[in-house]
Amino acid sequence: MSDWLISIAGTAQGASVATMMALMSAFFHAVFGALQKGAHDPWLSRGSIDLSFAVISAPIALFLVPWPDTRMALIIAGAVVVHFFYKLTMARAYERAAYTVVYPVVRGTGPIVTVAAASIIFREHFTAMQWVGVVCLSGGILLLALRNLSEEKVDPRTIKVALAWATLCGVLVAVYTTYDAWGIRQSADPFTFLAWFFLFTSLDFPVIAWLRYRRMADPPRIGPLMARGVIGAVLGWFSFGGVMLATFLDKVGEAAVLRETSTVFAALIGWFILGDNVGPRRLILMCLIALGAVIVELGG
C-alpha cells in the first residue's frame, strides 16, 4: 500500500484520496475528543488511550517496518515534544469546561494558522475564494463555541482559563499539523513514520495518568478506563494517521481545513450521545462550517 500511496502523491487521484482521508479523520477525531472528555478524568482518559497506542504500535514499529535512521529519530523526537504540549493543553481545557465549548475553540483556531504556515513552509497558496471558505469555516466554529459558552453555568473565571487553554491548544494543533506533514514527507515510507510516531508520542501520558490515578481518593475502575483507551487508540490511528496521510498526498492546508469539519461531527455527538441541546442556531452554524469546507475544496 505504501508504494501505491507514494505513486499517487501530488496527483489528481492523490487529491481525491486525501479529501476522503481528511473527512474520515474529521469524524474519528470528533469521536476521539468525546472519549477523552467523557465520563472519566481527561488525564486518565488520555493516559489509557496513549497506553493502548503504545501497545498497538510497538509490534508494528519493532517488527514490521524499518528502524528510523538518526535524522528520522530526531524528527520524531520533535513530534514527541509538540504533541506532549498539545495533549497537556487539551487536558487542561477539558478539565475546566464542557466538551462542546472547548472543542470548537481548539478546532476553530487551527485552520487559519495552519494555512498561513503551509503557505510559508510548503509554498502552498490558497486562492481568494479558498480564504473565504477558511474564514467561513473558522468563523462558524468559533461562533458555535460562543453559542455553547452562553449556556454554560460555570464560574466566569474558570471559563476564561478554559478558553485560554483551548486557544493555546488550537495554536498547537496548527503547529503539530504542519510539523507532522513535514515529518511524514521526509520518510521514504509513510507507514514507517506513522508506526514510530504513534509509539514514541504515546509514552508520556500513561506515566502522568498513573501518578494521578495513585493520588485519587476514589479512583475509577481500571476495566472501563482501559476499554475506553483501546477504542480511543483505534480511533486515533484513523484520525491522526488519516490526516497525516492526507497531508502526504496533497496540500497541507486543505487537509487541515477539511479535518476541522470534525466540529460538526462533535456537535452531533454532543447532541445525540452526550445529551447536549443543539437547536436551530447551532444547526445553522454547523451548515456554515460545512459550507466553508466545500468552498475551500471547490475554490482551489
Image (spheres, rainbow, N blue to C red):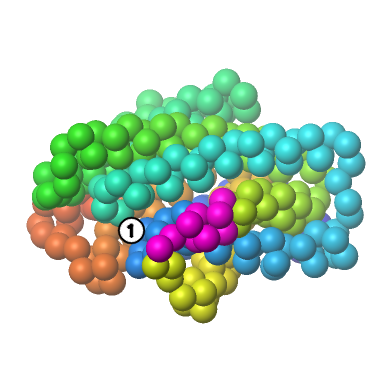
* Above-or-below relation of 132 to 228: above
Q: How many marks?
A: 1
Image coords of residue 288 (percent x, y): 24, 46
The residue located at (63%, 62%) in the rendering is: 51
The residue located at (43%, 48%) in the rendering is: 91
The residue located at (11%, 59%) in the rendering is: 279
Quarter of the view holding residue 157: top left
* Above-or-below relation of 206 to 148: below
Image coords of residue 248 (percent x, y): 66, 45
* In this picture, residue 15 sits left or right of residue 31: right
**Residue at label 1?**
266
Q: Nearer the viewer, residue 58 or 240?
A: 58
Q: Quadrant of the N terminus?
A: bottom right
Magenta residue span = 208-217
Q: Secondary structure at mark 1?
A: helix
* Above-or-below relation of 278 to 135: below
Residue 51 visible in the snapshot: yes
